[in-house]
Image (cartoon, rainbow, N blue to C red):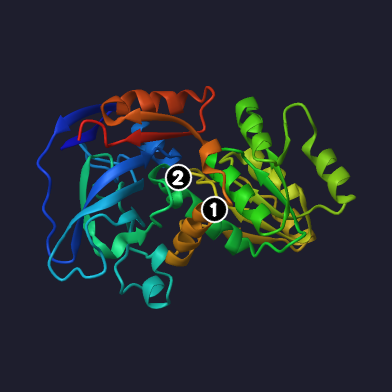
């Protein structure tokens, strides 16, 4: 089988490896598609060198088919369509014993802390698998993981029908959050300076604001009659985005921090105090979020095809990363691992 290995300094090499047979409780998958996400880009930029040991197979947004099962595996059979929930928790830390395994204090993220999906054949523990309906295509199935992030984020915010929701940052996760909030009945606006991302947002039937050419505060006041929005999602990863989201909120509004801020950024705590705002962290997902994401994809409630900008064969993994990093007319790029199998 072929595998794409990240070898450091933004470089990849594709090489042939021997497939790993499944052991007890394991399943060998034929990987169909793997999505590239912002975390993968962070890895290639060196931001996660402390966690990724090169050479490494990365990637955690995937879809595929069960090829073989190991001893004592009864829930899965060859031919089943699946995705992977890439969280490996310890089960005994305070977070796990409190029922919050997804934010385990010793959490290992598959595809970062251990080998990932950018290969033709991948052997994983059966407990990581989430079933995909046979009628759901494997391309949209590869978006189950980022959509599960969005489902979790909207759930953490407890978004209600009719609420006004501002999403600051219209990348893939921001747009998926906007779509999930709209499905929940919210009135949604996305703030995004990139013209291509705004055009994709508009194709999804969502309203957008360009914060470069329009004053976001004025636009929010016009939209809400001066009250402010009920919920603001900070998905930009910028200090300016966090400030804009904070100041857009109504009294007792909810600020949901989704983006990863690798360095401490200022937070207007006076605004939090003055308007009695709620600050909510939202990290990864629970299994129920993953299962709901699959349901939304299967129902066609999320227009996954509009988010997929390009599909590249496994042999062109390096070029696929370069295309996504360029930001030029690209939203979501998938790696096709089926070519030449």
User: Quadrant location of residue 186?
Assistant: bottom right
Q: Is residue 116 visible?
A: no
Q: Which residue is mark 2?
A: 140
Report which quarter residue 99 is drawn in.
bottom left
At label 1, counting other C-alpha atoms closer than 10 Å, the crowd grade (few under 14, some 14-19, many 20 or more) is many
Q: Nearer the viewer, residue 88 or 42?
A: 88
Dot 2 crowding, Cα within 10 Å, few <14, some 14–19, many 20+: many
Q: Nearer the viewer, residue 54 or 337?
A: 337
**Residue at 22% across, 34% down:** 5
Q: Which residue is mark 1?
A: 150
Residue pushed farthest front? 135
Q: Residue furthest bottom?
A: 97
Marks 2 and 1, the one that precedes in the sequence: 2
Whether residue 89 is visible here, answered yes or no, is yes
Looking at the image, residue 324 sits to the left or right of residue 184; the answer is left
Q: Which mark is residue 35?
A: none
């Amino acid at each position: 089988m072929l595998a794409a290995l990240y070898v450091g300094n933004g470089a990849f090499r594709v090489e042939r490896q021997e497939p790993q047979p499944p052991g007890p409780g394991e399943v060998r998958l034929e990987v169909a598609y793997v999505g590239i996400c912002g975390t993968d880009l962070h890895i290639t930029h060196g931001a996660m060198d402390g966690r990724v040991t090169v050479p490494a197979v990365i990637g955690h947004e995937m879809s595929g088919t069960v090829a073989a099962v190991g001893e004592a595996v009864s829930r899965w059979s060859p031919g089943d369509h699946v995705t992977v929930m890439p969280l490996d928790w310890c089960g005994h830390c305070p977070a796990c014993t409190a029922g919050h395994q997804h934010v385990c204090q010793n959490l290992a993220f598959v595809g970062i802390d251990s080998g990932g999906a950018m290969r033709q054949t991948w052997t994983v523990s059966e407990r990581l698998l989430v079933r995909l309906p046979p009628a759901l295509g494997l391309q949209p199935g590869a978006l189950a993981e980022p959509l599960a992030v969005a489902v979790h984020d909207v759930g953490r915010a407890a978004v209600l029908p009719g609420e006004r929701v501002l999403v600051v940052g219209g990348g893939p996760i921001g747009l998926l959050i906007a779509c999930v909030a709209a499905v929940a009945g919210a009135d949604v606006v996305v703030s995004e300076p990139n013209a291509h991302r705004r055009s994709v947002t508009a194709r999804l039937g969502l309203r957008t604001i360009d914060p470069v050419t329009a004053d976001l505060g004025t636009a929010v006041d016009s939209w809400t009659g001066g009250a402010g929005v009920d919920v603001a999602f900070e998905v930009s990863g910028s200090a300016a985005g966090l400030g804009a989201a904070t100041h857009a909120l109504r009294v007792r509004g909810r600020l949901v921090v989704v983006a990863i801020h690798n360095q401490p950024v200022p937070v207007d705590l006076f605004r939090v105090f003055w308007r009695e705002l709620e600050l909510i962290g939202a990290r990864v997902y629970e299994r129920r979020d993953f299962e709901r994401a699959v349901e939304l994809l299967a129902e066609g409630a999320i227009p996954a095809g509009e988010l997929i900008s390009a599909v590249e064969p496994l042999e062109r993994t390096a070029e696929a990363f370069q295309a996504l990093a360029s930001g030029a007319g690209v939203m979501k790029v998938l790696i096709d691992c089926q070519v030449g199998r």
